[in-house]
Amino acid sequence: MTGNNIPGEEGMNIVTRRFVARAAAAAGGVVLSSALALQAAQAQDKTYVMKMTLPTLNDPSYFFAKNYAANLEKDSGGRIKTEIYPASQLGSIPRQIEGTQFGAIQCALIPPEFFVGVDERFEVMAAPGLVNSMDHGQRLAADPAVKKLMLGLGADKGLHGVALFMNAPSSVIAKNPIRHLADFKGKKIRVLASPFQMQAIGRLGATPVAMTLGDVVPAIQQGAVDGAVGGIVVWTPMHFQDAAKYVTETGQPAVYAIVEINKAWYESLPADLQKIVDEDAAKEQAAIGPLASDIVNKARKGWTDTGGELISLPADEQAEMMKTFASVGADVSKTKPSLSDAYQIVAAAAKRTQ
């Protein structure tokens, strides 16, 4: 006999209890739906702060950061609020990387080889001889295989890569002019933190000294190093002519910047904001090429306008230098399988994007 057929008060009580249970369940569903709707509305209203850090100022990385920040705020409807801290305001490069890994900083724009402590494969973009121009450098950065490799590094160490671009060709700033390959012999030259750069400079007869950007000026002034590898887009706007006036434009290696997001912060974003973070970075990478080239040209002019000298090696010596550098990438990476595989991916992409 079902509850609906039970006579008398007992049957009425069963029916009543079932009605109340169904009503309560329905009411609970309404409450749950309302709570979920409220949570969704709150997520739409929540503001997420993105602190952007970089070691440089008024170079392509800085303008990438400015444009990326503006588009993030616009495309998110103000739900992402950006703060830009150039010229290592948030600490040395290692501190900036650590801050981005662990969440104190949400975004970093730094040459990838400085992330070598996170994953040694970050350094492959610093191999000399990969590219022969700014345009070639941007094509290499946009190659799908290179983007997949480089932007995927560090995913297990708190990082989410969103963009890669060539910042500038390398040059060597020095207190005394370097006009010939022989002038490198015996000099102490600051390099980025990469065995690729160390071996390249070592093959020229100089002693490589790994050093972050903030230490370069005092090191040159105090004689700790004789010169430094970097980019004219750094030397000019950051007034390195106060320390040295001679810049030898070797063009090697290309100086890249990688844009890394704190992975936990990224994953805390609603899906629509994650999409904006990724897509706006990709748009800025595609757009940075002409702007970066223009900044390089203006920096070169700015250097000479303020009394600095730009030096080119004689053509035969430049060619000799390139031959000297040709096997650096393969030689450095050959004893490390994962690094060798990464180098082969980048080197193959460099050939097909020439």
Image (tube, rainbow, N blue to C red):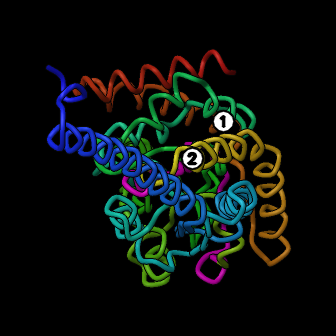
User: Whole-percent x and y of residue 79?
Assistant: 63, 64
Please name the amino acid that badge 1 sits on: Gly
Q: Quadrant of the C terminus?
A: top right
User: Whole-percent x and y of residue 167?
Assistant: 64, 51
User: Whole-percent x and y of residue 6?
Assistant: 17, 29
Say which residue appears at 78% left-offset and 64% top-offset. 299
Q: Are marks 1 and 2 in contact (CB under 8 Å)?
A: yes
Say which residue appears at 78% left-offset and 43% top-offset. 287
Question: Residue 233: in sight, yes or no?
Answer: no
Q: Is residue 253 magenta-colored? A: yes
The answer to which of 23 and 10 lies nearer the viewer is: 10
Q: Quadrant of the N terminus?
A: top left
Say which residue appears at 41% left-offset and 67% top-offset. 96
Please name the amino acid that badge 2 sits on: Tyr
Q: Is residue 328 magenta-colored? A: no
Q: Is residue 123 left or right of residue 183?
A: left
How far is disc 1 from disc 2 in space, using C-alphas?
Answer: 8 Å
Question: Residue 314: in sight, yes or no?
Answer: yes
Q: For mark 2, what is the residue? A: 256
Q: Is residue 17 left or right of residue 68?
A: left
Of the numbered discs 1 and 2, the one sitting upstream in the chain is 1
**Magenta span:** 240-266
Asked if residue 301 is positioned above or below residue 290 in the image, the reply reads below
Query: Callout 1: few (<14), some (14-19), or many (20+) C-alpha neighbours within 10 Å?
Result: many
Helix, strand or loop at mark 2: strand
